[in-house]
Image (tube, helix red, strand yellow):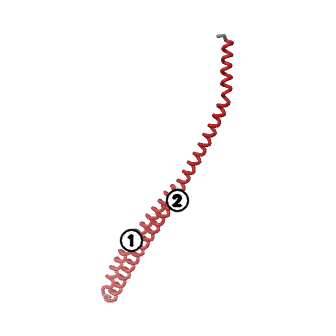
């Protein structure tokens, strides 16, 4: 086969390919468009699904936060009542002690100086106990507030 024949043959092949190529390109473009639409639809569906799940989680978190707030409020209320009860109990104890001391002072004037010194020491001890109880209650309250702040910080961070 001569070079000229080969060129004619190649020219025929190229013309055949060129004749079918636009149809194939058009078909390929159509498939790419369909694929693009499918991908966009899938992305949209995934986006909606993620948004729905995110909104659901947000609602769950809001519920949990509200529940935690209620628990903390209840706990603080319980602590407040407990502290008030202890204060009232200590107040009653002090009132009883003071009344007892007044009666002793009236009845035993001869032991007045010794009893006054003893009472001062006893009062100092009671004051220290009251201070210790108050400090303990205050420290507990601060711990709960710190725990609340930490929980709110974590929840804020998770938000």
| Quarter where residue 90 is shown | bottom left
Left/right placement of residue 67 relative to residue 2 reads left
The residue sitting at 36% across, 82% down in the picture is 96
Rendered position, 101 above or below 49: below
Residue identified by numbered label 1: 133
Q: Earlier in the sequence, mark 1 or mark 2?
A: 2
Left/right placement of residue 31 relative to residue 137 reads right
Mark 1 or 2: in front is 2
Image location of residue 2, percent across then percent down: 66, 10
What is the total number of numbered labels drawn onto the structure image? 2
Left/right placement of residue 4 relative to residue 87 reads right
Mark 1 vs mark 2, CA separation in Å: 42 Å
Rendered position, 90 above or below 2: below
The residue sitting at 60% across, 44% down in the picture is 40
Residue identified by numbered label 2: 59
Q: Nearer the viewer, residue 66 or 2?
A: 2
Q: CB of mark 1 within 8 Å of CB of mark 2? A: no
Rendered position, 150 above or below 80: above
Image location of residue 66, percent across then percent down: 50, 64
Please identify the quadrant where the N terminus is shown: top right
| Circle 2: element type | helix
Q: Nearer the viewer, residue 86 or 42?
A: 42
The residue sitting at 68% across, 16% down in the picture is 8
């Amino acid at each position: 086969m001569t070079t000229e024949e080969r060129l004619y043959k190649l020219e025929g092949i190229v013309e055949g390919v060129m004749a079918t190529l636009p149809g194939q390109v058009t078909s390929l473009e159509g498939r790419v468009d369909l694929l693009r639409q499918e991908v966009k639809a899938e992305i949209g569906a995934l986006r909606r699904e993620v948004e729905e799940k995110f909104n659901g989680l947000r609602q769950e978190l809001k519920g949990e936060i509200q529940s935690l707030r209620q628990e903390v409020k209840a706990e603080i209320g319980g602590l407040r009542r407990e502290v008030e009860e202890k204060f009232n109990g200590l107040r009653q104890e002090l009132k009883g002690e003071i009344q007892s001391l007044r009666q002793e002072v009236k009845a035993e004037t001869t032991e007045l100086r010794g009893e006054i010194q003893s009472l001062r020491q006893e009062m100092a001890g009671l004051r220290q106990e009251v201070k210790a109880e108050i400090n303990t209650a205050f420290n507990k309250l601060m711990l709960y507030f710190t725990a609340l702040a930490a929980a709110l910080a974590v929840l804020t961070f998770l938000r």
